[in-house]
Each structure stands twice: as C-alpha cells, then as structure tokens.
Image (tube, rainbow, N blue to C red):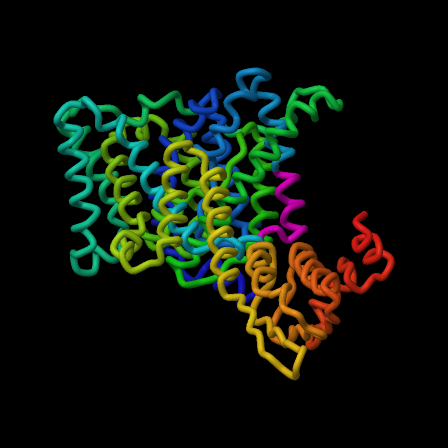
Amino acid sequence: MRQTIQKEWFSNPRSDLLAGLVVALALIPEAIAFSIIAGVDPKVGLYASFTIAVMIAFTGGRPGMISAATGSMALLMVTLVKEHGLQYLLAATLLTGVLQILAGYLRLGNLMRFISRAVVTGFVNALAILIFMAQLPELWNMPWAVYAMTAGGLAIIYLFPRIPFVGKVIPSPLVTIVSMTAAAMAFGIEINTVGDMGKLPDTLPVFLLPEVPLNFETLSIIFPYSVGLAIVGLLETMLTSTIVDDLTDTSSDRNRECRGQGIANIGAGLLGGMAGCAMIGQSVINVKSGGRGRLSTLSAGIFLLVFIVFLGDLLKQIPMAALVAVMIMVSIGTFSWDSLRKLGSYPLSTNIVMLSTVAVVVFTHNLAIGVLVGVLLATLFFANKVGHFMVVKNEAGAEGVRTYRVVGQVFFASTEKFTAAFDFREALDRVQIDLSEAHFWDISAVTALDKVVIKFRREGTKVELIGMNEASATIVDRFGLHDKPAEIEKIMAGH
C-alpha cells in the first residue's frame, strides 16, 4: 500500500504540480464554454470541473488523466436544462454517477477490449479535429494582434523546450500563458480575454440537494438523460484512458475508473456542478507538461478553484489567444499523423473503420455515435474476414462413401459457404463429416449443420458426424434437430 501511494502520488511531485497549474489555466475557458453550451451559469461548469478533478484524483483508476466538465456531456444536457431547469440537471448528474458506479461493479470497463485499434485511432483523430475547430471562433475576423499572439504562443510552446535545462523543467504551455498575459498587459493590447467568456464565481461551492420532487415522474424525466450521460461519459473516459496508457506506457484499472467517475459525478451534483468525464485534450496537456501521477489531477482541481475564487481579477486578463495556442498544440499532438502516413499500407477495412469513425464524430459532434459506427463496421469486417477462412474439403473413400472435412469457424457469416460445399445430388450410401478442425459458434451454424444432415438423409444417405469438440457439441446438442427423432419426423413429413 505504501509503495503504491508513493508511486501514484509522490514519484513526480514538481512536474505534477506544474502540469496541474497549466491544466487549471486551460480548464477555465473550456468549463465556461461548456456551461454556455448546456445553457447554465458558468459557475456550474467551473464547480463541476473543480469537484470532478479533485475527487477522481483519489477514486480513479488512471493516474495522470484529467476529468472535468466536457463538451460531449454538455451537448446531452441542452434539452433537459431548457425544458426542466438546473435542478433537474443536478438530479440527473447524481443518477448518472449511480449508473456509472453500477457499471464499474458490473465490470463493464472490460468491454473496451472489443473496441479495435482503428476505432480508437479514429476517435483520437476526430477529437483532435474538434479541438482545433473549437478554436476557430477565436481566430475568425479578429485583430492582427490575435494572430501575432497565437503565432508567438506556438513558437514558445515548440521552441522553449530546446533551451538547456530550463526548457526541460518548466512546461512550455505555462510559459506561453504567463508571457502572453504579461505582454498583453504591458502593451495594453485589446483582445479577447478569459474575462470576456463569462462571469467567474467569487465564492466556494456549497453542499446542496437538488430541489426536485422525489417521485416516479422525476425519475422518468431524468433517467433517459442520465443513461445517455453515463454511457457517453464512460465511453469517452475509457478511450481517453487508452490514449494516456499509450502516452505513458503504463496501464489503468478501467473498472475502478468507472466507479471513480460515478463518485466524482455524484460529488459534482451535490456541489452544484454538471456531470463530466475524462478530457482527452486536458489529459494530453497534462502528460505533455510532465504530469504522471494523481497529484497532477488533484493540483489541477485545487489550482482551478483558487484561481477562480481568489485570483479572478488577474485571471480575467489572460488573453484567449494564449489559450488558443495551447489548444492548437494539443490538437496537433493528439492527432495520429502516423495513421495518415500508413493509409497506403494498412488494409482497406482498417482505413474505412478509422475514416468512418472520424467522419461521423466530426459531423455529429457525438463521440458515442461515431464510436458505435466504428465498432459495428469493425465487427462486420471481422466477421466477413473470419468467414472466408472456413473451408470444406471432400475426400472419396470406399465405394459409395465420401468424407467431408470441415476446417475453420462456422458462424452466421460462413453458414452459406458451409452448406454450399456439400453435393447432395451425388448418389452415396454414407457420408462422414469430420469436424475435428471446426468450431460451431452460434445457432445459425447449428441450423446449417441440421440442414446439411437432413438433406443427405432425404436422399437416403446415412450421415455420421465425427471429431466434434466439446464446446461445439454443447451448442449442437442443445439447439440441433438432426439427432432428435421427433423433430426430424415433423421436418421430413413437411410440417
């Protein structure tokens, strides 16, 4: 236990604290923007980001990953807030947390193994594009100073790390934010600042219970929204954890992360915040700035609260151009450029899955729909590919006897090929079907086997099945009809 605490909390304190500082600064405009999207006061998103970041630092299963209010979750809240108000949103946030805790105990985090690498790559690329697109309003039809400051910020981000020693110690995004803010204040440059995004709260969050009736009608209103929030939140969190795993070359406890997200969202709802989840952009900022442990996530939440409550007047002076430069860096660093370089060498099916995921996510701005499309396409391509690996070889034996040897996987995608491989018109006394190198996976496969056996018997041919493995025998014995005389009589009689 002591070694685990040391490793997860205090193995990298200086870098974790500096990374948390950078993340806190970058969280502020995003939390305000997401609050505006959801149709609530900016403090709802800011309090949520503080609460979720602090609580997930203790309860999450992925050290170094940043969770807070997110755009994908905010989009799902719009109708609920519009039709029923903030109090119902807080109630839905609490129920979202309960559902996510339940998902963790049901070990639904293990379902991530069914999401292919092509889908994950598509998700990452789509999110990188969305992060970049989100910066465009701050770059469209703006004074020349905005473009100069953004370019200067990017130059600092990429060149500062080249400075010996200092460049390795201080995160370049932090240097960008501080230097651009100082320049804007010193020269009196009038451009959009964080203060223009919305009013910052000046008080600490307080404990509260949603003021909604505790009855079935309330549950019927919030339950559909909570289910959607829970699914999207866990999906984005699990995919983000995969990215952070790759960036840090470490592993995460996904089921613990599900439970942690649930606890954090319950905490957010009780402190007047909206539901949130892991943020790939902020997580990448954290990792790129040197954050690795739970201390980076905790410090991000604490710095965020300190900034907005106690240093609001100074914080309002941060130019949005500086934060835009940081987010453009995140977008560039998040995008998998290798996936573009290897388009020509990867299989066509892999490219289609990846590009489809990107297209759907970017078009709908809904990560869940995009990932679902990617998973369905990957499943169809996989089923089609495995179906082609099934072959049926036939060998002539003694006169009037033929052996069919089945090799490969027999399931819904290969049943048509399986039945077409048998010659039912050949005059035979006996057919032997060797299944020692085959496996039957589903009811479609069992139905195809029944069809083959019954067709041969209708032609007066005796059929013998040999070599069936135990797993196949179990499903065939349970659902097959060819070895059940009563059922065969009905079929043979035409019923």
Q: For this rendering, which residue is in front, 317 or 270?
A: 270
Identify which residue is drawn at 75% across, 22% down. 215
Residue occupying the point 31% across, 54% down:
339
Query: In x, y percent, where is residue 382?
Result: 49, 56
Say which of 388 and 42 sits in front. 388
First to last magenta residue range = 97-109
Residue extending furthest top?
A: 83
**Left or right: where 304 falls relative to 335:** right
Q: Which residue is painted at 47% across and 28% down in the image?
A: 75
* In-front residue for pair 363/205: 363
Marks counted in the figure total: 0
> Can you say which quadrant of the picture contains the N terminus?
bottom right
The image shows residue 75, relative to residue 292, as above or below, that is above
Residue 489, how many percent across, how many down? Answer: 84, 56
The percent coordinates of residue 77 (x first, y second) are 52, 26
Work out whether 255 lies above or below 273. below
Q: In front here: 169 or 84?
A: 84
Question: Is residue 339 in view from this perspective?
Answer: yes
